[in-house]
């Protein structure tokens, strides 16, 4: 039998099971533009009273002495009760949600645009004396002859839209590293019902979309990508899928016929999902967003099912123990 263990560092203070100061913690992780969160409940005493907003937080969990980082971020909110203190923390992708900029790009890939947003944000952070954000992998994605970033929405929302157009996944690792890349099937973690799977839920997504049509503008296909995009007045479109209900999108960032068709296919591929599977399992700190899991021994299924992990929630308290909720979509 393995015994759950954890180590939570807040600023210069470290809490472990032996300190008996932790009632409960919950870590939620997902794809952008969601920001990973931590909710931590502490006993109220002189030591926990010193927890301050803006302090760095690192959460490690696992069994016995084998601990894995499942969250790193910054304390954002502290709620003090009579006997308890509730601490809310956000991972460092928080900076993307409050960062806004205006920028025009010519003949740049989605990945180059994301890299420029990251560089611009890091310059701002360094000016304020804060640690810059780092990335693990940023892939190119599709090419945009002309693309505009506006301050009407935050930088993280812009990155999420670029990911959807390229059919990429975007997330930050538990260590706080940004990823903007194509989903890559990895060696799956095998989960078996009755062995490490506690509960299985199949959620039907409300998705009336039968097809997707994307309209671009100012097509460069009439004069190549060297054209002056603002001179053309002709619109054009790309369509993917068929059905009674059609999702129609207008995207002025798309300037050529090849790109508009690719974007329509990518958006259709991401949105045409009928089901999402949630697995509640014995706590597994190694499973992360972007991983692959293989589900076996589930009633009603003949073959193992492989899922792309898009959500992970770790929960530990002394009443229920250590559990992990994995949300995934079927690998195509």
Image (spheres, rainbow, N blue to C red):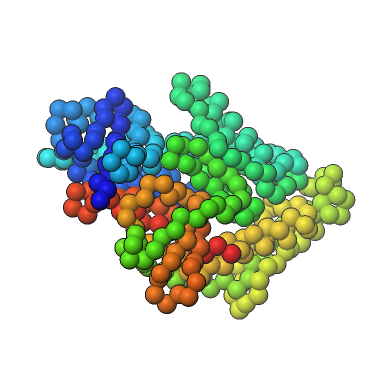
* Residue at 44% across, 64% down: 295
Displayed quadrant of residue 146 = top right
* Residue at 30% across, 31% down: 10
Measuring from the top left, give residue 307's x and y in whole percent.
49, 61
Which residue is at the front of the view, 278 or 208?
278
- Residue 325 located left or right of residue 251: left
- Residue 145 located left or right of residue 302: right
Displayed quadrant of residue 203 = bottom left
Which residue is at the front of the view, 300 or 289?
300
Measuring from the top left, give residue 185's x and y in whole percent.
57, 54
Measuring from the top left, give residue 321's x and y in whole percent.
24, 51
State which quarter of the image contains the C terminus: bottom right
Visible residue check, residue 89 = no
Does residue 161 sit above or below 86 in this rendering? below
Measuring from the top left, give residue 252's x and y in whole percent.
69, 53
Which residue is at the front of the view, 322 or 222?
322
């Amino acid at each position: 039998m393995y015994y759950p263990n954890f180590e939570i560092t807040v600023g210069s203070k470290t809490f472990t099971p032996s300190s008996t100061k932790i009632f409960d913690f919950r870590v939620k992780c997902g794809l952008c533009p969601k920001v990973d969160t931590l909710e931590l409940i502490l006993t109220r005493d002189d030591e926990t009273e010193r927890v301050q907003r803006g302090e760095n937080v690192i959460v490690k969990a696992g069994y016995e002495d084998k601990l894995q980082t499942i969250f790193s971020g910054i304390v954002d909110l502290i709620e003090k009760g009579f006997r308890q203190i509730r601490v809310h923390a956000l991972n460092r992708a928080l900076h993307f949600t409050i960062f806004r900029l205006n920028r025009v790009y010519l003949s740049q890939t989605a990945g180059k645009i994301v890299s420029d947003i990251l560089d611009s944000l890091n310059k701002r952070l360094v000016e304020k004396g804060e640690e810059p954000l780092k990335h693990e992998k940023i892939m190119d994605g599709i090419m945009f002859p002309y693309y505009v970033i506006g301050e009407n929405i935050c930088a993280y929302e812009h990155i999420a839209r670029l990911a959807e157009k390229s059919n990429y996944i975007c997330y930050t690792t538990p260590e706080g590293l940004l990823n903007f890349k194509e989903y890559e099937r990895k060696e799956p973690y095998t989960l078996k019902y009755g062995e490490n799977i506690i509960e299985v839920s199949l959620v039907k997504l409300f998705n009336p979309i039968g097809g997707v049509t994307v309209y671009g503008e100012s097509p460069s296909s009439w004069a190549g990508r060297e054209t002056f995009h603002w001179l053309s007045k002709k619109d054009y479109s790309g369509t993917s899928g068929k059905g009674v209900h059609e999702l129609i999108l207008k995207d002025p960032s798309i300037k050529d016929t090849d790109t508009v068709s690719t974007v329509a296919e990518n958006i259709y591929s991401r949105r045409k999902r009928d089901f999402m599977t949630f697995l509640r399992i014995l706590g597994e700190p190694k499973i992360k967003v972007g991983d692959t899991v293989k589900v076996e021994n589930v009633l009603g299924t003949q073959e193992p099912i492989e899922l792309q992990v898009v959500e992970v929630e770790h929960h530990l308290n002394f009443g229920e123990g250590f559990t992990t909720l994995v949300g995934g979509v079927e690998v195509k």
